[in-house]
Image (tube, rainbow, N blue to C red):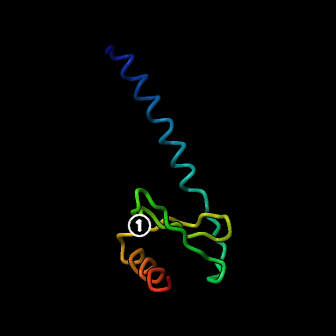
Amino acid sequence: MSEEAVQADEATEQKPVEEAKAVESAPVEETPVDPQDVSYQAVEKEGTVTAIWEMQGQKHLRTIDPRSNEGKQILALFETAA
């Protein structure tokens, strides 16, 4: 590859990184979450829970790893309730 092509390629690669930095610096507004409105959905693949989605209505709040301590606690609550 010529030196000009390498420099052009590097300039192209750096542009998305700069845009990502601008997005990261934007303030994030957090809305208080009412614990009664939060629900959990297990995502299964071939009979195995691969993720737990924390939902507020139809809004996805976060994904919880079922292997984490919090994920294990959530799964244990649902297994004893069934």
Q: Out of 57 and 45, give the one closest to the viewer.
A: 45
Q: Which residue is mark 1?
A: 65
Toward which corner of the image does residue 66 lie, by quadrant? bottom left
Q: Out of 40 and 3, give the one closest to the viewer.
A: 40
Q: Is residue 62 left or right of residue 80?
A: right
Residue placed furthest toward the left: 1
Toward which corner of the image does residue 46 lie, by quadrant? bottom left
Height in image: 50 above or below 72? above
Q: Residue at position x 38%, y 16% from top? A: 4
- Looking at the rendered structure, the kind of residue marked 1 is Asp
Task: Pinpoint residue 77: horizontal percent, then vertical percent.
Answer: 46, 83
Task: Pinpoint residue 39: horizontal percent, then vertical percent.
Answer: 59, 75
Q: Residues within 10 Å of mark 1 (few under 14, many from 20)?
A: some
Q: Residue at position x 43%, y 77% from top? A: 75
Height in image: 47 above or below 9? below
Circle 1: element type: loop
Task: Pinpoint residue 33: horizontal percent, then vertical percent.
Answer: 64, 77
Quarter placement of the N terminus: top left
Q: Residue at position x 33%, y 14% from top? A: 2
Task: Pinpoint residue 7: horizontal percent, then vertical percent.
Answer: 39, 23
